[in-house]
Image (cartoon, rainbow, N blue to C red):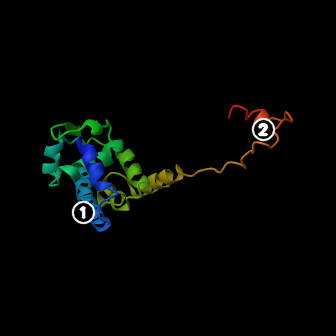
Amino acid sequence: MSLINDWRDMAYSSTADKGELQRLWQDYFKKEKDIYTELLKTPDVEVRGTVSELAEKYGISLMYMTGFLDGINDSLKEANDIENMAEDTVVSLGFDKEKLFRNMVDAKADWLYELPEWDDIYSKEERESLIKDQKKSHTFVREGKKIGRNDPCPCGSGKKYKNCCGKDA
């Protein structure tokens, strides 16, 4: 079994005690915040190492490091192969600053996108603009009323929808 599967089984367990799971996530989020605080101090420096080396460097368990890698993977300049990751797999934490910020906003992780270290990367106005843009990107437009099978076809043929444009739908 791979590290990522072990992490997901532990962190998203449907059989685990809810209180225990909540404590796990509270502890994980604190450690995650500490790692991001360190990474954001030197955002243009690519941190590399094996999964176990990085876990040791940041003082966290192998499972927490796996969870961290799972969380940051979509924000990296080059994604790691987390599905096949082992303790000795070399990974990179070279992140795209804007992607990372936007993904933190998207995840509603205000404890991360409000870290003071972002102040040295983006001005307050830039951060506010990125937040606004990211939140707008999830605005959905409602479509008109759904066409029923027996309604007249919107193409104007005079036939029922089910016998015209909806025939193969």
Question: Is residue 80 among the parts visible in the rendering?
Answer: no
Examine the image and state in which quarter residue 10 appears. Answer: bottom left
x, y percent for residue 33: 27, 58
Q: Secondary structure at mark 2?
A: helix
Instruction: Work out whether 1 lies above or below 61.
Output: above
Per the model, the C-alpha gap separating discs 2 and 1 is 56 Å
Query: Residue, x 28% and y 39% (percent of image)?
Result: 82
Answer few, some or many: residues within 10 Å of disc 1's Cα (few below 14, many 20 plus, some between 14 and 19).
Answer: few
Answer few, some or many: residues within 10 Å of disc 2's Cα (few below 14, many 20 plus, some between 14 and 19).
Answer: many
Q: Nearer the viewer, residue 27 or 18?
A: 18
Q: Is residue 2 left or right of residue 118?
A: left
Examine the image and state in which quarter residue 107 appears. Answer: bottom left
**Where the N terminus falls, by quadrant?**
top left
Q: Is residue 70 left or right of residue 123?
A: left
Q: Nearer the viewer, mark 2 or mark 1?
A: 2
Circle 2: residue type:
Tyr
For mark 1, what is the residue? 27
Query: Residue, x 29% and y 38% (percent of image)?
Result: 83
Q: Residue 139 — which label?
A: none
Query: Residue, x 35% and y 60% (percent of image)?
Result: 114
x, y percent for residue 54: 17, 46
Q: Residue 161 — which label?
A: 2
Circle 1: residue type:
Asp
Count of numbered labels shown in the rendering: 2
Q: Is residue 149 left or right of residue 122?
A: right
x, y percent for residue 106: 43, 53
